[in-house]
Amino acid sequence: MTAALILAIATTLFAATTPKPAPTEVPSCLEFYKHACSEAIGKWLPEMDDWYGFEFFDLKAKRVNFTDAFIYEGYKPKWRSGLFAGWELVRPRDGTFFVYGSAGPPKGELVYDYAHETAFYDQGCCAWREVVAAAGVPPPPKRVVSRNLTALHTLRGVALGQSIEDVLRLYGKAPVATARHHPAIQRLTYLHNFDKDCGQSQNFIFKNDRLIYIALIDSC
């Protein structure tokens, strides 16, 4: 699957909007994080639950006994023992550091593939952290670290551009949920429990049977 085809498939989902004035930075953020503060980045981050208010019906997470992680720039994840036994969430440590909001606040690192319009970032605070790869994303509102993300994939072999059947083969059979008002958009969700209160969710969103969004989330 070529990068051009992935972009063609995903681009309508992230349709460009009329530029708006940059939001005002939160004073408490500026006090502690200075130039890393960016409300514009916070609003720009491609979050699956925000896309056009998609509502997924009959969504049931498939329970699995494994975690997953990205392999990025040749760095392979390390195994964590103890309560959170599983693969560490590999994030773009060489990316642009950002912080937004006042609750927490959420903070993370971001890299962007300007040639292929692909984003890779992590963010989190307190008891949750997510690492996300998304295709067909318009450029961020401020210049960030640029990386070629065409080789980005997970430890289990999942990569942007794959089909639903590809992911089912790698992860195992699971219910496929379809967006209520957008039949071309489908989603797979898997869940691994560290204990009764904490776990990792592995989320995959497809458009026209091509993977455009991967989110690995550790939370309690």
Image (cartoon, rainbow, N blue to C red):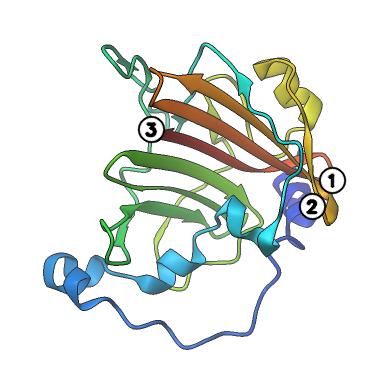
- Rendered image quadrant of residue 131: top left
Examine the rendered structure and indicate whether residue 55 appears above or below residue 2: below
Q: Earlier in the sequence, mark 3 or mark 1?
A: 3
Q: Residues within 10 Å of mark 1 (few under 14, many from 20)?
A: some
- Which residue was labeled with disc 3? 90
The residue type indicated by label 2 comes to: Ile
Tell me, yes or no, whether the two marked residues, 3 and 1, touch with CB atoms within 8 Å.
no
Q: Secondary structure at mark 1?
A: loop
Tell me, yes or no, whether the two marked residues, 2 and 1, touch with CB atoms within 8 Å.
yes
Expressed as whole percent of the image width and height from the top left, the position of residue 48 reads 60, 51
Expressed as whole percent of the image width and height from the top left, the position of residue 198 reads 38, 26
At x 46% / y 27%, what residue is drawn?
200
- Which residue was labeled with disc 1? 208
Q: Earlier in the sequence, mark 2 or mark 1?
A: 2
Residue situated in front as seen by the camera: 82 or 22? 82
- Which residue was labeled with disc 2? 9
Residue situated in front as seen by the camera: 123 or 95? 123
Expressed as whole percent of the image width and height from the top left, the position of residue 55 reads 71, 52
The residue type indicated by label 3 comes to: Val
Q: Is residue 148 left or right of residue 96?
A: right
